[in-house]
Image (cartoon, rainbow, N blue to C red):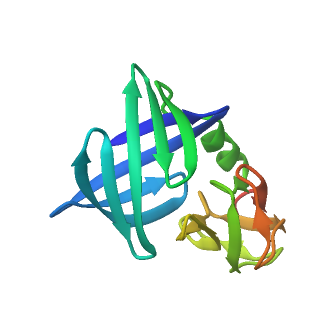
Amino acid sequence: MRSTWLDRDRARAVDVVPLGAGRYRVTVDEGVFEIGAQRLGDGRWRLVGQQGSWNVEITACDRRRFVRLGHADFVLERSDATRGARGSRAQEGRLESPMPGVVTKVLVAKGDPVRKGQALLAVEAMKMEHLIRAPRDGRVADVHAAAGEMVSGGVPLVELEAEV
């Protein structure tokens, strides 16, 4: 199931693929991970991934979802847009951190050629590693992050030049 959600002024592309037995492959922007989901009732869920487990509360109100993940609160609004602001910036070659976290790996350097889908760097957020992947073939124009650096959501991490 594909959908687009507005997180403040940013559009987030979300794709959820059932794998069976309560397991799902979830893609949020460029981050891909697998989770197990157990419904606890009253909008509460238990999510289990490679890095641990989390309790989540989701309250629906029309097109909005109020989400509490641990001690973090989010307000998401369903968007009719098939491609939001993040998608258009990724097409321009500017790849951003999907959320606040720590850069754990930088896998490319300025000038490196890259292929569509290639992992460029990794950001750890909420005990999960999110790989930032190239949206198209190209060349790394600049890298704005280093391993061990804390980054905010929406900050540019890597910029790509036109296709090689």
Pick whichever, 52 or 82, lies toward us: 52
Left or right of 17? Residue 95 is right
- Residue 160 visible in rendering: no
Q: Residue at x 80, y 72 (%)?
A: 149
- Outermost residue on the left side: it is 21
Q: Residue at x 71, y 72 (%)?
A: 103
Q: Is residue 119 above or below residue 2?
A: below
Give residue 78's position: percent from left, percent from top: 46, 28
Q: Is residue 134 above or below residue 69?
A: below
Give residue 36's position: percent from left, percent from top: 28, 64
Q: Is residue 163 above or below residue 113?
A: above
Give residue 164's position: percent from left, percent from top: 71, 66
Q: Quadrant of residue 113?
A: bottom right
- Outermost residue on the top side: it is 62
Pick whichever, 162 or 30, lies toward us: 30
Q: Quadrant of residue 123?
A: bottom right
Give residue 21's position: percent from left, percent from top: 15, 64
How many numbered dots are placed on residues in this image? 0
Pick whichever, 29 or 113, lies toward us: 29
Left or right of 99? Residue 49 is left
Q: Residue at x 42, y 66 (%)?
A: 33
Pick whichever, 121 or 41, lies toward us: 41
Q: Quadrant of residue 63?
A: top left
Quarter of the picture holding the N terminus: top left
- Residue 14 visible in rendering: yes
